[in-house]
Image (cartoon, helix red, strand yellow):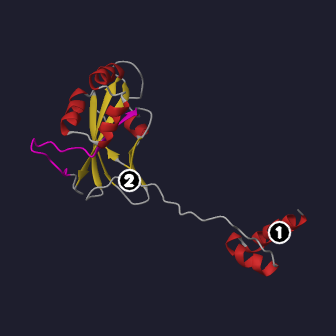
């Protein structure tokens, strides 16, 4: 126990005298033998693009009544740097890469999107509670299998249905940056 106390005091003294960056050199000068058997793991920073709910709903607020934003759906599309959507189908509608459902007080976050581009357009469709409840029962949005299909295999028709039923809609653009969390630039809700 006394040895551990001595080593700790030596390390603290060295850190105060020469700074934490020189701590390894200091321990070799003082003769302390601090040995670690811990394995070092590599930290991988999160790469994500997200919609900032605070700025999106700052004017309209959030709530559970008619005419007040309750939940929102974000359809993510691959885009060119000028905002042109990539991947239009025969019907002329592009297929979203993924679709996410969020409460109006939470950010919509999409991690590690992978396409030939790092640029994305978001279509943000906002619903008041009565409208969302109608959609929920029609599309069964609370079913885990349906939510998984929205995220993993969305269709252009489903995205079009969601946009058509929205109380408010806007679009956003974002360029994904490796190892960073990037906030999308969104137009205001009408």
Count of all numbered marks drawn on residues in the image: 2
Residue 113 percent location from the top left of the image: 34, 52
Q: Which residue is mark 2?
A: 112
> How far apart are the two marked residues, 1 and 2, measured between alpha carbons?
44 Å
Range of the magenta residues? 84-103
Image coordinates of residue 117 in percent, x first then y, are 26, 58
* Label 1 CA crowd tier, 10 Å (few <14, some 14–19, many 20+): some
Residue receiving disc 1: 7
Q: Residue furthest left?
A: 90
Q: Is residue 20 magenta?
A: no
Q: Nearer the viewer, residue 161 or 188?
A: 161
- Quarter location, residue 14: bottom right
Q: For the residues labelled 1 and 2, say whether their Cβ atoms are less than 8 Å apart.
A: no
In this orientation, does residue 188 appear? no
Magenta span includes 102: yes
Quarter of the rendering containing residue 40: bottom right
Relative placement, left or right, of 13 versus 61 is right
Q: Secondary structure at mark 1?
A: helix
Position of 74 relative to 61 (above/below): below
Residue located at (71% from left, 71% from top): 19
Q: Along the polypeptide, which appears first: circle 1 or circle 2?
A: 1
Left or right of 164 in this view: 73? right
Residue 61: x and y in percent read: 41, 29
Q: Vertically, is 179 above or below 134?
A: below
Name the image quarter holding the C terminus: top left
């Amino acid at each position: 126990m006394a040895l551990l106390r001595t080593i700790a005091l030596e390390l603290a003294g060295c850190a105060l005298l020469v700074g934490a960056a020189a701590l390894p050199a200091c321990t070799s000068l003082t003769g302390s033998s601090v040995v670690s058997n811990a394995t070092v793991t590599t930290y991988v920073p999160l790469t994500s693009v997200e919609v900032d709910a605070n700025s999106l709903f700052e004017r309209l607020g959030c709530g559970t009544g008619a005419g007040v934003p309750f939940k929102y759906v974000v359809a993510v599309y691959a885009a060119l740097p000028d905002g042109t959507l990539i991947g239009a189908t025969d019907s002329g509608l592009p297929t979203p890469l993924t679709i996410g459902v969020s409460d109006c007080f939470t950010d919509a976050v999409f991690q590690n999107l992978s396409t030939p581009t790092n640029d994305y357009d978001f279509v943000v469709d906002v619903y008041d509670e009565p409208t969302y409840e109608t959609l929920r029962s029609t599309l069964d949005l609370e079913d885990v299998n349906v939510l998984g299909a929205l995220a993993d295999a969305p269709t252009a028709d489903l995205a079009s249905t969601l946009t058509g039923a929205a109380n408010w809609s806007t679009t956003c653009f974002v360029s994904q940056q490796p190892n960073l969390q990037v906030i999308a630039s969104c137009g205001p809700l009408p």
